[in-house]
Amino acid sequence: MLTSFHLYAEVVPVSNLERSTTSSGLSSEELYLQIWEREQKHTTTRWNVTTFFVSISFAIFGFSLQTPNPTVPPIISHAAALAIYWFAFVLFWRFNMFTHCLREYLREMETAKQVEINVQTRVNQAMGGQYSKWLSTLSLMFYFGILYSTAVGMLWWQRIG
Protein backbone atom coordinates (compact mmCIF):
# COMPACT_ATOMS: atom_id res chain seq x y z
CA MET A 1 0.00 0.00 0.00
CA LEU A 2 2.77 2.46 0.90
CA THR A 3 4.73 1.52 -2.18
CA SER A 4 1.82 2.26 -4.49
CA PHE A 5 1.19 5.58 -2.72
CA HIS A 6 4.86 6.46 -2.74
CA LEU A 7 5.17 5.79 -6.46
CA TYR A 8 1.92 7.59 -7.16
CA ALA A 9 2.95 10.61 -5.07
CA GLU A 10 6.25 10.89 -6.94
CA VAL A 11 4.64 10.61 -10.36
CA VAL A 12 1.54 12.76 -9.84
CA PRO A 13 2.03 16.09 -8.08
CA VAL A 14 -0.89 17.42 -6.08
CA SER A 15 -1.50 20.18 -8.60
CA ASN A 16 -2.19 17.57 -11.31
CA LEU A 17 -4.83 15.67 -9.34
CA GLU A 18 -8.35 15.99 -10.56
CA ARG A 19 -10.94 16.39 -7.88
CA SER A 20 -13.09 13.47 -8.94
CA THR A 21 -10.76 10.57 -9.75
CA THR A 22 -7.04 9.93 -9.96
CA SER A 23 -5.35 7.76 -12.56
CA SER A 24 -5.22 4.93 -10.01
CA GLY A 25 -9.02 4.84 -9.91
CA LEU A 26 -9.25 6.33 -6.43
CA SER A 27 -11.10 9.52 -5.75
CA SER A 28 -9.02 12.30 -4.22
CA GLU A 29 -10.86 11.81 -0.93
CA GLU A 30 -10.09 8.08 -0.94
CA LEU A 31 -6.44 8.76 -1.70
CA TYR A 32 -6.37 11.38 1.07
CA LEU A 33 -7.88 8.94 3.58
CA GLN A 34 -5.45 6.18 2.56
CA ILE A 35 -2.49 8.51 3.02
CA TRP A 36 -3.90 9.67 6.37
CA GLU A 37 -4.41 6.07 7.49
CA ARG A 38 -0.85 5.19 6.46
CA GLU A 39 0.47 8.20 8.36
CA GLN A 40 -1.38 7.05 11.47
CA LYS A 41 0.07 3.53 11.19
CA HIS A 42 3.52 4.98 10.62
CA THR A 43 3.17 7.16 13.72
CA THR A 44 2.20 4.11 15.77
CA THR A 45 5.26 2.25 14.50
CA ARG A 46 7.46 5.26 15.25
CA TRP A 47 6.29 5.36 18.86
CA ASN A 48 6.54 1.59 19.33
CA VAL A 49 10.14 1.54 18.11
CA THR A 50 11.10 4.61 20.14
CA THR A 51 9.46 3.30 23.31
CA PHE A 52 11.23 -0.04 22.93
CA PHE A 53 14.72 1.43 22.64
CA VAL A 54 14.22 4.12 25.29
CA SER A 55 12.92 1.45 27.70
CA ILE A 56 15.98 -0.71 27.03
CA SER A 57 18.22 2.30 27.65
CA PHE A 58 16.58 3.10 30.99
CA ALA A 59 16.60 -0.57 32.01
CA ILE A 60 20.34 -0.92 31.36
CA PHE A 61 21.03 2.30 33.22
CA GLY A 62 18.80 1.33 36.16
CA PHE A 63 20.25 -2.17 36.49
CA SER A 64 23.78 -0.78 36.35
CA LEU A 65 23.00 1.44 39.36
CA GLN A 66 21.52 -1.43 41.39
CA THR A 67 24.28 -3.98 40.89
CA PRO A 68 26.64 -3.93 43.93
CA ASN A 69 29.64 -5.66 42.30
CA PRO A 70 29.17 -5.50 38.54
CA THR A 71 31.25 -7.74 36.30
CA VAL A 72 31.39 -4.93 33.73
CA PRO A 73 32.55 -1.47 34.78
CA PRO A 74 29.51 0.80 35.25
CA ILE A 75 30.89 3.30 32.76
CA ILE A 76 30.44 0.73 29.99
CA SER A 77 26.83 0.05 30.98
CA HIS A 78 26.11 3.78 31.21
CA ALA A 79 27.73 4.42 27.83
CA ALA A 80 25.67 1.60 26.29
CA ALA A 81 22.49 3.04 27.82
CA LEU A 82 23.28 6.49 26.41
CA ALA A 83 24.16 5.07 23.00
CA ILE A 84 20.84 3.22 22.86
CA TYR A 85 18.93 6.36 23.89
CA TRP A 86 20.59 8.44 21.15
CA PHE A 87 20.00 5.62 18.66
CA ALA A 88 16.30 5.77 19.59
CA PHE A 89 16.37 9.54 19.12
CA VAL A 90 17.91 9.25 15.65
CA LEU A 91 15.35 6.60 14.67
CA PHE A 92 12.55 8.82 15.96
CA TRP A 93 13.96 11.74 13.97
CA ARG A 94 14.12 9.63 10.81
CA PHE A 95 10.59 8.31 11.24
CA ASN A 96 9.42 11.85 12.00
CA MET A 97 10.79 13.15 8.69
CA PHE A 98 8.68 10.63 6.78
CA THR A 99 5.61 11.48 8.86
CA HIS A 100 6.19 15.15 8.11
CA CYS A 101 6.37 14.34 4.39
CA LEU A 102 3.02 12.52 4.49
CA ARG A 103 1.40 15.31 6.49
CA GLU A 104 2.72 17.92 4.09
CA TYR A 105 1.28 15.98 1.16
CA LEU A 106 -2.12 15.93 2.91
CA ARG A 107 -1.89 19.67 3.53
CA GLU A 108 -1.01 20.28 -0.12
CA MET A 109 -4.08 18.32 -1.21
CA GLU A 110 -6.21 20.45 1.12
CA THR A 111 -4.65 23.72 -0.04
CA ALA A 112 -5.09 22.80 -3.71
CA LYS A 113 -8.79 22.17 -2.94
CA GLN A 114 -8.50 18.60 -4.20
CA VAL A 115 -10.43 17.39 -1.15
CA GLU A 116 -13.07 18.89 1.05
CA ILE A 117 -11.37 17.42 4.12
CA ASN A 118 -9.10 19.87 5.96
CA VAL A 119 -7.88 17.89 8.95
CA GLN A 120 -4.18 18.61 8.44
CA THR A 121 -4.69 22.33 7.92
CA ARG A 122 -6.69 22.51 11.16
CA VAL A 123 -4.09 20.50 13.05
CA ASN A 124 -1.31 22.79 11.79
CA GLN A 125 -3.29 25.84 12.91
CA ALA A 126 -4.06 24.33 16.33
CA MET A 127 -0.52 23.12 16.96
CA GLY A 128 1.20 26.19 15.58
CA GLY A 129 2.13 28.94 17.92
CA GLN A 130 4.88 30.74 19.66
CA TYR A 131 6.24 27.66 21.46
CA SER A 132 5.44 24.94 18.94
CA LYS A 133 9.07 24.43 17.79
CA TRP A 134 10.42 24.49 21.36
CA LEU A 135 7.82 22.05 22.64
CA SER A 136 7.66 19.61 19.74
CA THR A 137 8.16 15.98 20.65
CA LEU A 138 11.44 15.87 18.76
CA SER A 139 12.73 18.92 20.66
CA LEU A 140 11.60 17.54 24.01
CA MET A 141 13.33 14.22 23.31
CA PHE A 142 16.49 16.12 22.38
CA TYR A 143 16.35 18.22 25.58
CA PHE A 144 15.78 15.11 27.67
CA GLY A 145 18.70 13.38 25.91
CA ILE A 146 20.96 16.30 26.82
CA LEU A 147 19.72 16.15 30.43
CA TYR A 148 20.15 12.36 30.53
CA SER A 149 23.67 12.59 29.09
CA THR A 150 24.59 15.36 31.54
CA ALA A 151 23.27 13.35 34.49
CA VAL A 152 25.26 10.29 33.43
CA GLY A 153 28.36 12.47 32.96
CA MET A 154 27.91 13.97 36.44
CA LEU A 155 27.53 10.48 37.88
CA TRP A 156 30.82 9.43 36.24
CA TRP A 157 32.49 12.60 37.50
CA GLN A 158 31.23 11.95 41.05
CA ARG A 159 32.54 8.37 41.04
CA ILE A 160 35.93 9.45 39.72
CA GLY A 161 36.29 12.36 42.13
Image (tube, grey):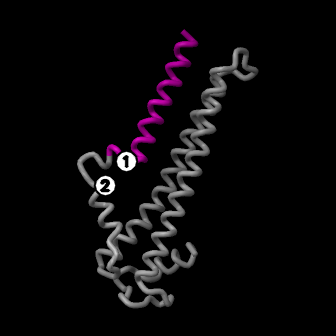
Q: Which residue is mark 2?
A: 127
For label 2, count other residues whose C-alpha is less than 10 Å away and answer few (under 14), some (14-19) or many (20+): few
- What type is the residue that disc 2 sits on? Met
Cα–Cα gap, marks 2 and 1: 9 Å
> Is 24 contained in the magenta span?
no
**Which of the image's four quarters has the N terminus?**
bottom right
- What type is the residue that disc 1 sits on? Ser
Q: Which residue is mark 1?
A: 136
Q: Nearer the viewer, residue 84 or 59?
A: 59
State which quadrant residue 58 falls in. Answer: top right
Q: Up-down: is 139 above or below 69?
A: below
Q: Position of residue 158 (x, y in %)?
A: 53, 13
Range of residues picked out in magenta:
134-161
Q: Nearer the viewer, residue 80 or 49?
A: 49
Q: Position of residue 39 (x, y in %)?
A: 48, 65
Q: Nearer the viewer, residue 71 or 28?
A: 28
Q: Secondary structure at mark 1?
A: loop
Q: Is residue 159 left or right of residue 98?
A: right
Q: Residue furthest top?
A: 161
